[in-house]
Image (tube, coloured by chain):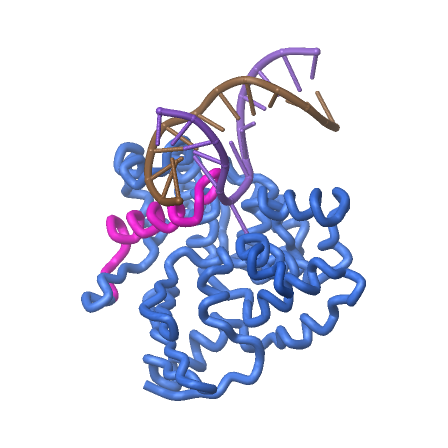
Chain colours: A blue, B purple, C brown
DNA sequence: CTCCAGGGTTTGC
DNA sequence: GCAAACCATGGA
């Protein structure tokens, strides 16, 4: 257990409810549990500092990168022009959000599942996958790893359907097969530039523009990618007269997109900003 | 009960 | 090239 101070933007609640991670748990108002790989951590806000459940060594080697502390989000927010009132207001409401560095395979599978599902439904399906094919890493929290490609390759179509995947089941089966056989190596394609990687990810059956961009943003940390889903499309239509405002933010467009996505789900709070 | 969800593929023009 | 139909299921 360690205690740390955090200077840059960091809001546990907003990160947990920004729709980028489906396995985070809110233990109570000031305490959240995050999982990645074989590791989990409980972070508790205590006044101006944070209690961290892991060792200093683990924080430095895993979690500091997971929470993207190499990047200054305060600096990114400062790039927003005053004229862009909607994104400006969204960033004020969403201040504290960071783009996490999450596992590539987990992002691919999770966002294939995400299509036409509500966030609670996505969380439910992902949780079932972990419980059924992952490994237990905490009895106290009944916590499991996200299954590896090998572990998921043993799942049958019927078993996957029991996790509520519906018509996405064949998408998952094909994606797992392609990754497990290394027909597409999620690690080695990380060297590809944004557009090449975008096109590579779209070659998965069941992956289109939106899911590919989510995997780019959350799995490959390509902060310039701004996925357009139903919520963002509505904002572009209602607030920007149909003209996509995100490309003008270049390599931080994805961060702006996260502010807007968070804000679009908290519109009542946005009215007061 | 009805409606819709962090879309993508297939089909028809 | 585009628009429309179709997709399974759970949560609200």
Q: In this rendering, would A120 be left or right of A75? A: left
- Percent position of residue A65, x then y: 50, 74
Above-or-below relation of A49 to A153:
below
Instruction: Please name whichever residue, B8 or A16, is drawn nearer the observer in this view of the structure.
Output: A16
Farthest residue in the left direction? A139
**Residue A200 can be seen, yes or no:** no
Please state the extent of the stretch shown in magenta in the rendering.
A114-137
Q: Quadrant of residue A269?
A: bottom right
Q: Could you tell me how many numbered marks the image carries?
A: 0
Magenta-span inclusion, residue A246? no
The quarter of the picture where residue A22 lies is bottom left
Q: Residue at x 44, y 41 (%)?
A: A117
Give coordinates of residue A172: x percent, y percent.
41, 40
Q: Residue at x 68, y 50 (%)?
A: A195
Which one is in front, A109 or A254?
A254
**The furthest residue to the front:** A272
Look at the picture and state if A75 lies above or below A239: below
Residue A169 makes an appearance in the image:
yes
Asked whether, in this view, residue A227 is left or right of residue A18, the answer is right
User: Compared with residue A148, is residue A99 higher up or lower down, i.e. above or below?
Assistant: below
Q: Which quadrant holds the C terminus of chain A?
A: bottom right
Give how far across and how far down residue A138 sits, in percent.
23, 67
Q: Is residue A134 magenta?
A: yes
Q: Residue furthest right?
A: A83
Q: Identify the residue at image location x=57%, y=80%.
A: A8
The residue nearer to you, when weighing A152 against A111, is A111
Q: Is residue A177 above or below residue A224?
A: above
Q: Is residue A242 left or right of residue A165?
A: right
- Which part of the image, by quadrant, shows the N terminus of chain A? bottom left
Magenta stretch: helix, strand or loop mostly? helix
**At 37% across and 51% down in the image, what residue appears?**
A123
């Amino acid at each position: 257990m360690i205690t740390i101070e955090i200077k840059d933007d960091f809001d546990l609640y907003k990160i947990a409810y920004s729709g980028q991670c489906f396995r985070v748990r809110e233990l109570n108002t000031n305490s959240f549990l995050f999982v990645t790989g074989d590791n989990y951590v409980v972070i508790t806000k205590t006044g101006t500092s944070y209690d961290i459940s892991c060792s200093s060594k683990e924080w430095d080697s895993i979690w500091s990168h997971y929470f993207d502390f190499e990047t200054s989000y305060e600096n990114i927010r400062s790039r927003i022009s005053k004229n862009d009132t909607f994104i400006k207001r969204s960033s004020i409401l969403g201040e504290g959000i960071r783009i996490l560095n999450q596992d590539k395979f987990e992002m691919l599978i999770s966002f294939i599942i995400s299509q036409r599902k509500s966030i609670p439904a996505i969380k439910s399906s992902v949780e079932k996958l972990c419980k059924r094919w992952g490994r237990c890493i905490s009895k106290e929290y009944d916590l499991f790893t996200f299954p590896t490609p090998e572990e998921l390759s043993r799942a049958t179509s019927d078993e996957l359907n029991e996790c509520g995947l519906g018509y996405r089941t064949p998408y998952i089966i094909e994606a797992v097969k392609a990754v497990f056989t290394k027909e597409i190596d999620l690690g080695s394609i990380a060297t590809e530039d944004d557009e090449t990687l975008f096109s590579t990810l779209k070659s998965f059956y069941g992956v289109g523009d939106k899911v590919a961009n989510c995997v780019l943003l959350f799995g490959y940390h390509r902060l310039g990618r701004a996925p357009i889903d139903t919520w963002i499309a509505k904002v572009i239509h209602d607030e920007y007269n149909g003209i996509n405002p995100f490309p003008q933010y270049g390599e931080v467009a994805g961060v702006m997109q996260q502010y807007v996505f968070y804000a679009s789900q908290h519109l009542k709070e946005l009215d007061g900003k």
